[in-house]
Amino acid sequence: MIDPNPSTPDAAAARRVVADYETVALVLQGGGALGSYQAGVYEALAEAGIAPNRYAGISIGAINVALIAGNAPTRRVERLRQFWETVCQPGALAWLGDIWASVPGLRGLASSIAAGRALVEGQPGFFALRMPPPLPGVDLPPGRVGIYDTGELARTLDRLVDWDLVNAAGETVALGAVDVESGNFAYFDSATCRLDARHVMASGALPPGFPPIEIDGRWYWDGGIVSNTPLEYVLEAQPRLDTLAFQVDLWSARGEVPRRIDDALEREKDIRFSSRTRKSTDSTLDRQRLRRAIAKALPQLPESLYGSELWALLEENACRKVFNVVHLIYRSRAFQGHFKDYEFSLETMREHWRAGYEDTRASLARPDFLARPRGESGVAAHDIHRHGR
C-alpha cells in the first residue's frame, strides 16, 4: 500500500499516474452518519498527495465537499475531524448506550440506543428537535415544515468553511438538490453560481426530518430523493475531460436476502439510497464507449456523408476522452441496523472513518486502479471489495 508520507516513491508514483488525467473528481453520496467514511477516504487521498480539482456531493456528501473545498489543503482533514467530532458529541442520555457498549455482544443494542438519542436529542452543531413540533393539519411557513431545526448546521458550516475558497477558481464544486415544487433535480455548481451554506443545507434537507431550504425564491429538498449519486453529472459535464473519479458510496446495492424484519428495513434503505449506482455508472461508461467508437469510425465513413445531417449528429457525439471510476463503497458492520444513517456515536463515527481510510489505501496500492484506461473502450471501473485486496 502507499505510504502515508506523500514524499515516498509509492506516493510519488501515484501522483504521476493521476497527472495523466485532466480532471480528478471526488464524488460523494448522501448517507447521514455514514458520511465519516468519506472523511477517511479524503484523508487517505490527501496523504498520498492526490488532490481532486472537481467535487460533487449530495446530502452529507455536500457537507463533506464544503468542508474540503472550503479550506486550505493543509487544514482540510483537520476541519473534517472538527465537524465530525462536533456533531457526534454524546448528549445527556449517552450513558444509556455506554453501559451496553461495554458488554461483549451487545454493540448492536448500544448502536440502536445511540440512534434513538439522535431522534430525541438531535446532534450538536447539526440539528435539534423542533419545539413545538409541526402537527398534521396545521399550516406553517415552508421553512418550518420539518421535525428538526437545522439552524445549528448553518452556524457550524459558516464557522468551519471559507466560502471564498469554495467559490475560488481552480476547483469546482457541485451540490445536488430537488426543487420541491417542480420535482426536478438541480445542481448548484460553483462554475455558474456562488455557493454558500444554503446550497449545502438544501442538498441535505431530507424530509420530513429537515425542512426545505429557500434559494432565490425556490424551495429545495435533499437531492437523494431523486438520485443519491452525482457521478453522471460529473462525467457528462461539457466539455468532457479525461477523468479519474473517486466515487464514494455509503449504501451498498448488493446484499443478502433478509431473514428478519429489521434486516428488511435496512436492506430496503440500502437499495433505495444506493440509487442503482452500478447501473448508472455502467450506463455512463457505455455511452462513452459508444462516443469513442463513433470518433474512430468517422474518418472511415464515405465522403458523400460529409456535411450531411447524419454526419453532424455523429460528429456531435464523437469523443475520445477516457473515464476511470474508482468505487469506494462502505460495507455495513454486523452490529448496524436500519438506523445506521442516524447513529452518530463517536465510536461508530471513528470506525466509519477508519474503514474509508483503509479502503482507499488498499485501492491506491493497486496501480491498475489508477492507470489511464487502455484499449479501444477508454473506460474502466474498479472496486477493491469486488477485485479483492
Image (spheres, rainbow, N blue to C red):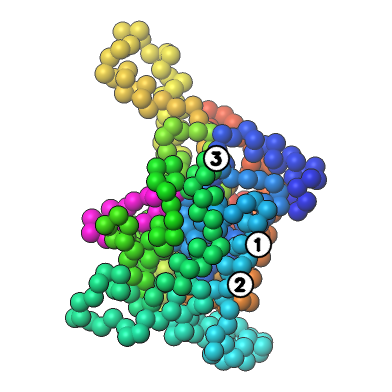
Majority secondary structure in the magenta region: strand
Query: Disc 2 residue type?
Result: Glu
Determine which residue is flagged by label 2. Answer: 85
Q: Which residue is mark 3?
A: 170
Comparing 45 with 72, the one in front is 72
Give the SS element for disc 3.
Answer: loop
- Residue shown at 57% from the left, 29% from the top: 375
Q: Nearer the viewer, residue 381 or 47?
A: 47
Please count the marks in the image. 3
- The label number, if any, that marks residue 78 in the structure image: 1
Q: Residues within 10 Å of mark 3 (few under 14, many from 20)?
A: few
Measured Cα–Cα span from mark 3 to mark 1: 22 Å
Residue 119 visible: yes
Magenta highlight range: 174-188
- Locate residue 137: give its quadrant: bottom left
Q: Position of residue 105 (x, y in %)?
A: 63, 85
The reply to whether the magenta stretch includes residue 179 is yes
Spatial separation of the CA atoms under disc 2 and disc 1? 10 Å
Is label 2 or label 3 in front? Answer: 3
Residue 176 part of the magenta segment: yes
Task: Tell me which label, 2 or 1, sits earlier in the chain.
Answer: 1
